[in-house]
Image (cartoon, rainbow, N blue to C red):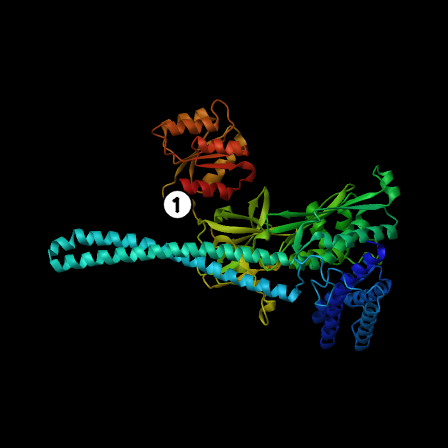
Amino acid sequence: MNRDDFMRELRATFRVEADDHLHAIAAGLVELEKLSEPAARAPVVEAVFRAAHSLKGAARAVDFGEIEGICQALETQFAAWKRGEIAPTRESIAATHAALDRIHRALVQDPARRPLPSTPAIREEAPSPPSPDPETVRVSVRALDERLIEAEELLAAKLAAAQHARELDELLPLFADWRQEWQKVQSSEARAANGAALSDFLGRTQEWLRSLEGRVTALRRAAGQDQLNVDKLVDDLLANSKQLLMLPMSTLTPLARKVVRDLSRELGKEAELTVRGEETCIDKRVLEEMKDPLVHLLRNALDHGVEPPAARTASGKPPRAAIDLRVTRINGSQVEIAVADDGAGIDVERVRVQAVARGVLTHAAARELDDDAIRALVFETDLSTSPMITALSGRGLGLAIVREKAEKLGGRVAITSTHGSGTTVRVTLPLTLATFRGVLVEVARRLFVVPTAQVERVTRFRGTDVQTVEGRESLAHNGRALALARLADVLELPDPRPPADNEARAAIVLGAGNERIAFAVDAVLDEREVLVKPLRKPLVRVRNIAGATVLGSGQVAPILNVTELMQSARRAPAPRPAPQADAAAAAGKAKRALVAEDSITSRMLLKGILESAGYEVKTAVDGLDALTQLRSEAFDVLVSDVEMPRLDGFSLTARVRADRALAELPVVLVTALASREDRERGIDVGANAYLVKSDLDHSDLLATVRRLA
């Protein structure tokens, strides 16, 4: 393809994107004319500011200098509105509308205006020459969307069938209970009455029950087969329909290559873009939403990350920088888009200074944050490490738009960087938008769905596991204090039955960016595929809610907006501490545990954890010492390390199982050995649980011990 054809393709794509941005700016201007209060105007000004910034970057990518210049002027005006230096007036808004008209005329008069060869099949229904393949048909986007919606609606039938099957499963055990009661009546009352009428009644009842049980069993078998058939039909139809809207990442790589090439020349830098995984197919709607963020990531890498050739040579690097764009499918239903450069990396101290200077952080807060948290600040709006505002950077918007777009799509963004070596930004997104995997949780007798993509883990804890750090409740997580919030409190729901202090509770750890918060819930029920139903007015702005789904039971469950949820949790006041209950007294007579561990530090740690939960704990310095104590005293559970002198944990467990008096004793192995072979060996010798120290937290150990002892 020659350059002229290439530019025509890019500009055809740009025109579609430009229309969206122009509509957004025009709508914002109309809204501004209706508003008079600065606080009400602020979010609208922010929206038009971002749209102008994105349109400017897209125009630059396709060499549309006229539009880029107009957008630069608009961006400067919107920035002044945003800072409060001047207020939007009728005259300035009218002038801005005139500028939008100039952009529209430039788009219409574009000499490169010609439809994309492949675009009509997706966006338009205009005539085109017959395809050389008779196996290819042209389908409009509207028709594709309608087919996809029809297929997705069948998901409700699939869920309903599964629900009916579960209800029948719950019904069947009732017959066993009824049969037991009948046997009692037959053996006692029937013989006592010694009446033929009673015997006849019981006989007919028995026949009726047998017939009814047979019918229900047959119904369950038929329902199970129906469920299998519907599952396959729905899954196949939905998967095939989704494929109609899947496009390869290669549709965006020409734009990416041009951005790198043109910006390198403009900045006087040398850079080579390597693309991997461009054959990966992603929902067309996701690709369209990620076009702007991808351009911002590449511009950020070139402008902020990559050094000039002379500076790279002086630091021992090749003069030509390497920028890597990598697309990878993960977890079957997600895709990761990573942009990496081998440039200067992020100067953490410079970001820290800029965060304080621009009011993002106070001096005290900036000193307390670790390097990872400081790096995450580059995604905040108004924060830029560029020393001046230029046509390329300095506004502090680029990476903020990346995070905003990713989270809007139900994804997340993470950044890693080594000063002097380079930076990598990873954007994790769903492959498709209509359906996704969600975790179903119960809170205050209500059901909610949390997107699986933003659930780091599910854990259990008790009130005794909760610590207070800087006035906030927290749990220990991977060696760090993890903020704890009660989901019922964040959602402002009345909790009908607050849990007791020693009662086990569930929590889901949610992540957005580099932040993690644990949310206490009443129960984590299961993970399932859900169909997203968008909220409509007046519910579209309900805080913390992103949409809704219909469960198999017919119940509507709200889908939580994780980003807003975490913001609400940060703003929520710290709960008043509950009085500590005496665990040992609440449990009655304390149970006895034996801890076998050769490391004194680990031994005291395990002893302290169990004692804080009300257990009476004795310790052994190795396996042989433990075996001696087990044979002389009674214990309810054995918690043992594996790697110990004289007698290791595997051998200790095997000898416990071989001893008739100790064979039923629960054994929990707590070890650093994490390989599959070690786990299998632990199970083979008879351990009831195998916990790896690197993944272990207090609640895991206590939940395991309580379950076994």
Badge 1 element: helix
Screen quadrant of the C terminus: top left
Whether residue 456 appears in this view of the structure is yes
Q: Quadrant of residue 40?
A: bottom right
Q: Which residue corresponds to the image point at 22% horizontal and 54% vertical from the top-left?
A: 182
Q: Is residue 258 left or right of residue 194?
A: right
Instruction: Give the residue pinned by disc 1.
Output: 585
Occupied quadrant, residue 165: bottom left
Q: Position of residue 532 (x, y in %)?
A: 57, 61
For badge 1, the amino acid type reads Ala
Name the residue rendered at 44%, 59% in the picture: 161
701 vs 405, nearest the viewer: 405
Residue 88 position in % (x across, y down): 78, 73
Count residues near mark 1 (Cα–Cα under 10 Å), then give few for <14, some for 14-19, many for 20+: few
Q: Is residue 554 left or right of residue 24?
A: left
Q: Position of residue 669 (x, y in %)?
A: 47, 34
The one of 273 and 704 positioned closer to us in this rendering: 273
Q: Is residue 304 left or right of residue 601?
A: right
Q: Residue furthest top?
A: 646
653 shown above or below 387? above
Q: Nearer the viewer, residue 536 or 120?
A: 120
Please say if 568 is above or below 640: below
**244 horizontally vs 381: left or right:** left
